[in-house]
Amino acid sequence: MTETVLSGTGLEKRFGGTVALAGVDLSIRRGETIAIMGPSGSGKSTLLHCLAGIMRPDRGEVTLLGQRVDTQSEAQRSRLRRSRFGFLFQFGQLLPELTAEENVALPLLLDGTPKPKALPPARSWFGPLGLAGLERRRPGELSGGEAQRVALARALVTGPAVVFADEPTGALDQANGAETMRILVEATKGQDSCLVLVTHDASVAAHCDRKVEVRDGRLVVDAGPGAAKPELPQRAGAW
Amino acid sequence: MNAVTLAWTLLRGGGRKGMLGSVLTLAAVGVTTTLLMFAVAGNFAFADRAERTAWRTPVPAGQVETARQLSVLDMVDGRPMTVVYLTATGSGAPPVPPGMDGFPAPGELWASPELAALLERLPADQLADRFDAPVTGELGDAALVHGNELVAVVGVASDSPVLSARPLDGETVVGISEFGTDAASETYRLYQSFMAVATVLMVVPLLVFGGAAARLTVARRDQRLASLRLVGATPGQVVRVTVAEAILTALVGAVAGAILYTAVMPLLARIPIDGGPWFVADLWPPLWATGAVIVAVPLLVGLSAVVGLRRVVISPLGVARRQTPPGIRAARLLVLVAFVGAFLFMSSRFLGMGALGSLLMLVLLAGVFGAINLVGPWVVSLLGRVTALAARRPAPLLAGRRLVDDPRSAWRTVAGIALTGFVAGFTVLLSPQLTGYAEDRTLLTVSVPTTQVEAVTASVATVLPDGAKVTGTNEVEGVSLVDVETPVDSAAIDRFRTEVAQIAPGSPTMGTDDWVRFDDQLFTDVKTGVLVVLCVSILIAMVSAAVSGASSVLDRRQVYGLLHLSGTPMKVLNSARRMETLLPLAVMGGGSLACGMLMAMPFSSGGEIAGNLALLFTVVGFGVVGVVGASAVSRPLLASVMRNTPPRPD
Ligand SMILES: Nc1ncnc2c1ncn2[C@@H]1O[C@H](COP(=O)(O)OP(=O)(O)O)[C@@H](O)[C@H]1O
Ligand SMILES: [Mg+2]
């Protein structure tokens, strides 16, 4: 259970004159849930993008199960994101023309599974996520919380190694947000995927095994059950 | 802040993507205006031509006859030639014919430029000897239907035998005081009614589409406008801002479209109708019509912006929730059936009703098209439903769903082609019954005073090829109709015509093949017209495909960007978009084409249709490539949307 799934070392990224990441090291072990916290503009999303192979860091490397990610071509990274990662964003990620179950089945369809074969595994997520009966609804007919859970089902349907969530409850009210977050953490753990969760809300982060805080592109706090030992030296280096 | 200032600020502040939307709206409105101008100008162009045929039909003088006029139709080199004989009576100043400086004196020959050239080219015994005079001057454009026309104005003495001739086609000498201005030729009245039908065919899809151009502006703005509502702008303010912006953009587009039209006029003038190209001036519609188009287009765009905005204005959250749109009622089918029924029931009755009949026919025809327009989206959504249901892969699933969700947008793209396709399919299979008198022989009918029959018989022997013979003679009150059967030899027949013109001037010889040729010309023109309308429809489809492609990308930029982040290949989205365009095009455009062909099958002679088919398929092929290409215009837009969308919209 201590195998490292995803790791970034020495990640730097700047946009013009803005330094978004100024040297970040972070590794995530199998089954771990980790919350990336920090004020707005501190570089949380940029870190997530670099780890997920959405962006190439200017410096540093990203590896997934020992394999370099940041050096791959856009097409390769795109395939990787589709097959090994799951994504959950704040809102607006469901295709309005597809039903809820088709939205969930989309990653399978994109990988060549025909629709009749892709729908049953997609549907099997609806019950556990409290979405039973909403399979045929369109995104426009779902509440914000329901839509987020459908998006979560889509993120999980391929059995990804890592689920990335960028402020997934930012558009939800308190109660709905907490509920969605509980389901997110439970479901991710339930299938042994890692979770990388970006948030600036401490009560949201409380659901996770481990918390890191980003300030001005650096990791300043790393706390949680599995955090202390392996990353202490790096943290010291950052200070 | 007043609406126009705010609109202008929004327009400038829209960013690159916002600007792109405005540019697309502008281009769409521009092309719509250009084509609308063309559709409108076509009517004036035919009216101009028709007007210029009027002077040839003599109008009996009300009081004092100042001149006498005889207009006849002759043939040379297989082409029709109009010859107008004029003589002054001496009682008062005779009217000046159009295209001339003065009334022709006896012995003068005024020829159209094309005729003058032909007079030079052909040996005198085939043409020039018919006039017995050198060319005095060239007729101006005002006298001509088009630049390729063969027209002669011949001044004769008042006692010339021409004026006492009794030609076969029954034209007689008429005492006049003015040249006619109203009585356009029968042919041109027919052309004008065809043009009116073509106008309906072009304008219906143009208006449908032109209204849709506003959609792009609205689609792009709805989020921001909903925010305006949220911060407390009144519905009235929101409507005024958007409408002002749409009208502003459309006005610029309309002016640009009118300018584009003038730029392409010289090209359009080359479309041959009635055997010749147009005078460029004919294609320029009167100023009031141009003004009306330039004013009407922005108003239409503004109006559809209001309609498109209703949902935003009703509730500030209106656009945030997108729902399954309600199905389109099959009841619309009944409206179509009713209109088609009425049209079929009335069609046989229209002919006897004159101008009112043609007007009624046009109204019902527009009704039929309007009804097809109601049914079209319904069929598109049906098509989408079937596609989505049968889909196993994401691209057809997405394409099918999108057709179900917004059948109107897909229909707008194919509407014109679906309407025109039927007519094109129908006409392409028809070819004129080129059954002249016989395979390689023709029958000429000569009308001469009975005293001249012998002279005609003599020239049959000397001028016409071996095997030519007189097959019958009929005498009516001193005039004889002589039927001559001859092997087809264009030069020899022209020589014969020239000899007969010298024996009995003023009564040209016509043959069975000539009448066939007139029908043939009309038929060719109908086909040209259909092809032009089809090209216009294809252009509309292209612009519409580009616009709806771009607006659907802009509408979904958030979800596309996020899908890209999750690793969705752009290929799938592009192929879905292509399918979304091609499916209705193939089914509805191809279907109406095939339908037309099927219905024309019983009348098809099978003769010369191979060339027609090849031409049609070339046009259709270019159309398909053009429409698919136009929908691909938004690919770079999709690419940029996919790359640049932040996961958190600001
Ligand atoms: N695409 C971009 N172009 C320019 N600057 C960017 C871009 N993305 C992020 N930034 C900048 O990088 C910094 C970190 O951004 P981000 O990682 O989105 O912060 P967070 O997610 O913590 O709010 C911010 O100053 C932001 O303005
Ligand atoms: Mg962020």
Image (spheres, coloured by chain):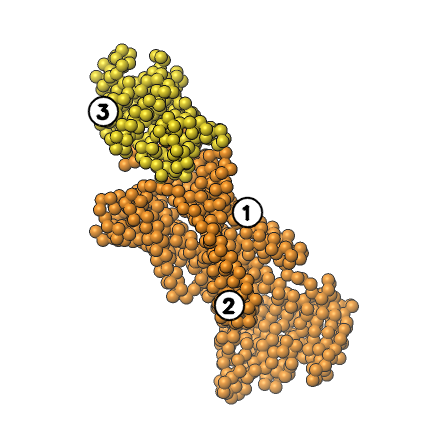
Chain colours: A yellow, B orange
The percent position of residue B195, horizontal first and vertical second, equals 50, 63
The percent position of residue B121, horizontal first and vertical second, equals 63, 66
Q: Which residue is mark 3?
A: A202
Q: Which residue is mark 2?
A: B358
Amino acid marked by disc 3: Ala
Residue that lies at the very extreme toward the right in this rendered image: B467
* In the depicted structure, whether residue A155 falls above or below residue B151: above
The residue carrying pointer 2 sits among few (fewer than 14), some (14 to 19) or many (20 or more) residues within 10 Å by Cα, namely: some
Amino acid marked by disc 2: Ser
Q: SS for tag 2?
A: helix
Q: Which residue is mark 1?
A: B621
The residue carrying pointer 3 sits among few (fewer than 14), some (14 to 19) or many (20 or more) residues within 10 Å by Cα, namely: few
User: Could you say which is closer to the camera, residue B138 or residue B482?
Assistant: B482
Q: Are marks 2 and 3 in contact (CB under 8 Å)?
A: no
User: Could you say which is closer to the camera, residue B81 or residue B614?
Assistant: B614
Q: Chain of mark 3?
A: A
Q: Chain of mark 1?
A: B
For the residues labelled 2 and 3, the Cα–Cα distance comes to 78 Å
Residue B415's disc is none
Q: Residue at x 63, y 81 (%)?
A: B162
2 or 1: tag closer to the N-terminus: 2
Amino acid marked by disc 1: Gly
Q: Which dot, 3 or 1, sits closer to the camera? A: 3
Q: SS for tag 3?
A: helix
